[in-house]
Image (tube, helix red, strand yellow):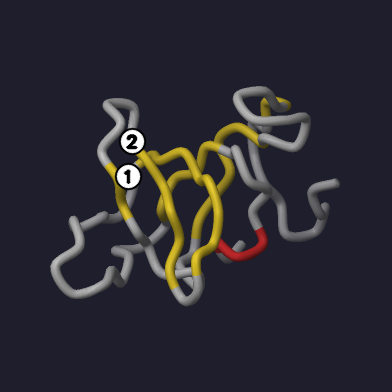
Amino acid sequence: MKLYNVTNGSQIRLKEDAKVPVGGAAAGKSTVLKFHHIDGAYSYCTDEEGAVFHPAAWTGVEIVFRGDVGEGQGNSVPSYSPDRPLR
């Protein structure tokens, strides 16, 4: 799944090293972040310590925790299957 398809407020795990803006903090494969929103070609994400990262919107990710109920809330998603879309 691509980051631009993720619901705001979700917790994600990067499936690849993310492209970031020049001077931005590196976000490597397997990094877990909270996705806040897309901001142009990049996104606004934070780690558990509040550090800000800007992975590219087209970065491949998996959802750890879906934030579709509201900010800071969501539904646990134990696994993602491309055959079964998230709703």
Q: Amino acid at mark 1?
A: Thr
The residues tagged by marks 1 and 2 sit, at their Cα atoms, a distance apart of: 9 Å
In the rendered structure, the answer to whether residue 13 lies left or right of residue 9 reads left
Check the image and name the residue furthest to the front. 39
Q: How many marks?
A: 2
Residue drawn 72% across the image and 30% down it: 70
Residue drawn 64% across the image and 30% down it: 71
How would you rate the neighbour count of disc 2 (Cα within 10 Å): few for under 14, some for 14-19, many for 20 or more?
A: some
Image x and y of residue 3, in percent: 55, 61
Q: Are marks 1 and 2 in contact (CB under 8 Å)?
A: yes
| Most foreground residue, 47 or 65 | 47
Q: Earlier in the sequence, mark 1 or mark 2?
A: 1
For label 2, the residue is 47
Residue drawn 57% across the image and 66% down it: 2
Q: Secondary structure at mark 2?
A: loop
Q: Secondary structure at mark 1?
A: loop
Residue drawn 28% across the image and 69% down it: 20
Q: Amino acid at mark 2?
A: Asp
| Most foreground residue, 21 or 31 | 21
For label 1, the residue is 31
In the rendered structure, the answer to whether residue 85 lies left or right of residue 54 reads right
| Most foreground residue, 71 or 77 | 71
Residue 33 location, quadrant? top left
| Most foreground residue, 21 or 16 | 21
Q: Is residue 35 above or below residue 25?
A: above
In the rendered structure, find residue 63 and report the number of the disc placed on it.
none
Residue 19 location, quadrant? bottom left
Image x and y of residue 54, in percent: 35, 59
